Amino acid sequence: MRIAAGGTTYRDTPEDLPPEQVSLLQESPCIDTTPWPPEHYCERYLACGEDADTLIHVVPSASFTSTMELARAGARMANEHRPALDVVIFDSRNMLMAQGLVALAGARAATNTDDVRAIIERLEEARENVQLVCALSSMRHVARTGRVPRLVGWAGTLLSVRPIVEMANGKEHPLGLVRSRSQESRALVERVKKTVEGEAGVRIAVMDSGRWDDGEELMERLVSEVTPIEAIHAALSPVSKVVAGPGLLGVAILGETTPRDGESH
């Protein structure tokens, strides 16, 4: 993913978007997320397919980005160059580390089988069971993309509140409003605990935008109270920080409906 602002397009790299540039763009009144063109995906598929007959690309939700459509076009181009290469584009119906947890579920499955259908079935199961819950400093920053009008209409005009939002299966849902960071952390923990009730296990991924210490504290609370199979703490990428704005704190949750002792964690 790239972003465009002020006539300049930025790649999602520290070179294009060092911290000072991220801070400037977070306050830009207008930004546009800009997926890579099909040629970019074609080039990457051909490079990754040197040692494989099948590739599975887990992409962010088609509800919020045109990545899937462009990736499919790139896959067709790659197949024209190399007819034996099959590229499967899989819609995670989510984003950020929720998309990441789906991809990791597929990667674990691929360590145990070469059956592409079985790997896709595991991806489909993970997609159905993953949720993303985020606390934002405000809706002002994400509103600039024009991709979440329902959420903006819900909380966009409120001052001094921090909206808690959820995304699952390609749909966003407002969960609540809090006024302090302590309330925010408590709300995230309670949401995770409610989500994992009845699950055989849970994998979590904490995310932050410039709040690493808060993310570590949230991680410690979740590990203590939820005892996940796997726990990851990841800072957002530069582009994600620009889109979400400063102060995001979130967690992706993947519930496991059955134990998976055969999979490496």
Image: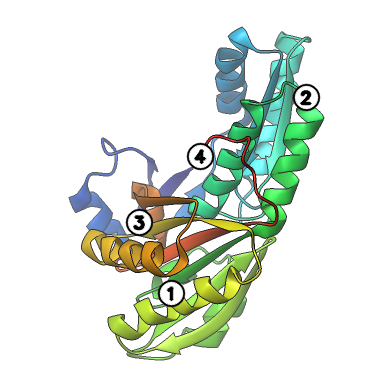
Q: Nearer the viewer, mark 2 or mark 3?
A: 2
How would you rate the neighbour count of disc 3 (Cα within 10 Å): few for under 14, some for 14-19, many for 20 or more?
Answer: many
Q: Is residue 70 above or below residue 65?
A: above
Residue projecting furthest to the left: 20
- From the top left corner, tell me how far across and down residue 265 is, in percent: 51, 39
- Estimate the spatial distance between the alpha carbons at disc 4 and disc 3, rounded to whole Å: 28 Å
Counting residues from the start of the chain, the first of labels 2 and 1 encountered is 2
- From the top left corner, tell me how far across and down residue 31 is, in percent: 42, 58
Asked if the residue at tag 3 contacts the one at tag 4, i.e. Cβ–Cβ closer than 8 Å, the answer is no
Question: Which residue type does callout 4 highlight?
Answer: His
- SS for callout 4: loop
* Residue, disc 3: 241
Q: Residue at x 75, y 24 (%)?
A: 76
Q: Which mark is residue 189?
A: 1
* Residue, disc 2: 115
Counting residues from the start of the chain, the first of labels 1 and 3 encountered is 1
